[in-house]
Image (cartoon, helix red, strand yellow):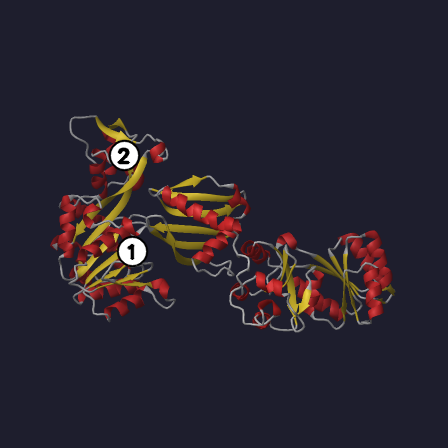
Amino acid sequence: MAEIASTTKKELLVVDDEVALCKTLSTMFEERGVTVATATTARAALEQVRRKHPDVVLLDLKLPDSSGFIVLSKLKAQFPDLRVIIISALSDEKTIQEALQRGASGYLPKPFDFERCFYTAMGIETVDLARLRPNPKALEHVPESVATTHHVLPIDWDGRTLQLVMPDPLDAAHCEELTALLGCAVTPLAAFGGDLAAAVRRSYAASAYSPLTGGAPATEPTARPAAIPPEIIQLVEHLIQDAHANRATDLHIGIGPNGPWLHERVDGVLRDVPVIPLLRSAYVQVVMRVKALARLDTATRGVPQQGQMQFPLATTTLDLRVSVLPTACGEHLAIRLLEPSLLLPLTQLGLMEEQLSQIKALMAKPAGLLLVTGPDRSGKSNSLYALLSTLNTGHANIVTVEEHVEHLLPGLTQMPLQASAELTFASGLRAALQHDPDVVMVSDLRDAQTAFLAVRTALTGHLVLGAMHTIDSSSAITRLFDFGIEPFFLCSTLSGIISQRLVRKLCTACRESSTVDASTLVPMGIEAPKGSGSVALWRAKGCAQCGNTGYHGRSALFEILVIDHHIRSLIIKRSPGAQIRQSAISRGMIPLSQSGWQKVQAGETSVEELLRVCGTEPH
């Protein structure tokens, strides 16, 4: 059982002349986060209550210096709201009634079940599963699938409040989620005398033949209330539709000390979104709704979860990837919005003519390793899919190993890792090699084993496409060295490396002309036109059309490192990545900054945006 949350932490006084029992009860309650004091006499008990002001007193009726009834009467006279539970070997009805009439909150005849004692002290009603007969109306209010998933048994329903037997009725987060899921107030109860899961199965099986169903097995009662209120369903739809309308690629729904917040990532940059009042009052219900749509375990909290779902729009269907993270204030959602129609062909990625020719030449090779590199959200997946689409002519068997399949391409064999808990990139790549491939794509060469298998696959006559998280093209070679790949293997297999970034495009409705001091371009490795101290360019302004950001849409920057005999000579020497990069630039490679400068000059983006994306390090 989980420790009691700090907001509900109790202080307990055990009054009994049996020292062993006091010690046992102290250990049990303290393990559950309750502060415990003990007393063996009536006099000590009254002194402890006056001094410590406990929340609960467990009181024996037979004490060496007084009757427990006298102590009970004194306690209730001085502290009317004090919760006193009688624990006594006397179990006759007369004694129990007298204790209750004098103000006792409960009566536990000895010997008692310690779990039942704990919950009784905490003010949680306990029920005997062996004798329990749930109200059919309560069972109708909660679908059996919900009861099974959340490990609860509904036993009574008064039209406003639902009584639920739970494994841990002090789990406030679970109670809150059930309140949100079922759309009504919940009273948690504790159980003893049997297995809760078995009681759930037995109760729903019995209700299937109850008079309320006409004596026939019940399917899904048509009158059963919806688990999620309609306004919550509409709110979730509104949030996703708005994010798509705002061109967001990611929607973040979180909660902090000041309440819920919303962020949308538009053109690669996060921005705040106003929070409507309903989200503030129904945050947990929104999280539950999204988790249910993404087929995640709504009963599991405190662990990260990932899932997917389809979201239909008027003109298309979005593929939503959902990530749930537990935080100090509650579960946070990150939803990635993927639109299949946005898959771009190779010719529309933003490559220069020279770069496009280089990539086509690399793909024309029957075997080799072609890498696409860059940080997160730099467009690597789009480039990989564009490469696959170009290669997908019907004359090659193409197999992919992907963490998430973002776009389904006809004619390809695409293997998502999340489909099986036992699949990894390495094991998936091994399996792909048994499928008679001509081309293999691995969406992330993230470890030494996967990288080595990719190199070996290329060495055996396959064309291998892969992605890596590195800052530029030459850094990928260094990363492969770090993985333990020998230089002679790379010289035999590595054919080229594509490095990329995404920059925001200037809004053509509001961009304005400006001049830039040529000296500010030097840190980016850009040589300004000779004979001029300033350069005429464009800069962002902001209008209603672009959300006052000055930018609308994104474009990609590329650098293509072709592995020729000169680069191979540096690789075989294990030359540093910086040396390989400078050598490639001196031999004509267009670096990322120069690719961006071309777009700045064309008025597609701004110097400020290029500086944000590429930084001030020489390129």
Q: Which residue is mark 1?
A: 407
Within 10 angstroms of label 1, few (less than 14), some, or many (20 or more) residues?
some
Q: Which residue is mark 2?
A: 606
Within 10 angstroms of label 2, few (less than 14), some, or many (20 or more) residues?
many
Residue type at mark 1 is His
Is disc 1 in contact with disc 2, using a CB cutoff of under 8 Å?
A: no
Residue at 55%, 56% (x, y): give it: 177
Q: Is residue 406 left or right of residue 307?
A: left
Picture quadrant where residue 98 is located: bottom right
In front: 135, or 251? 135
Q: Quadrant of the C terminus?
A: top left
Where residue 495 appears, as percent x and y from the top left, is 17, 57
User: As displayed, is residue 245 above or below residue 152?
Assistant: above
Picture quadrant where residue 70 is located: bottom right
User: As displayed, is residue 352 above or below residue 566?
Assistant: above
User: As displayed, is residue 63 above or below residue 179?
Assistant: below
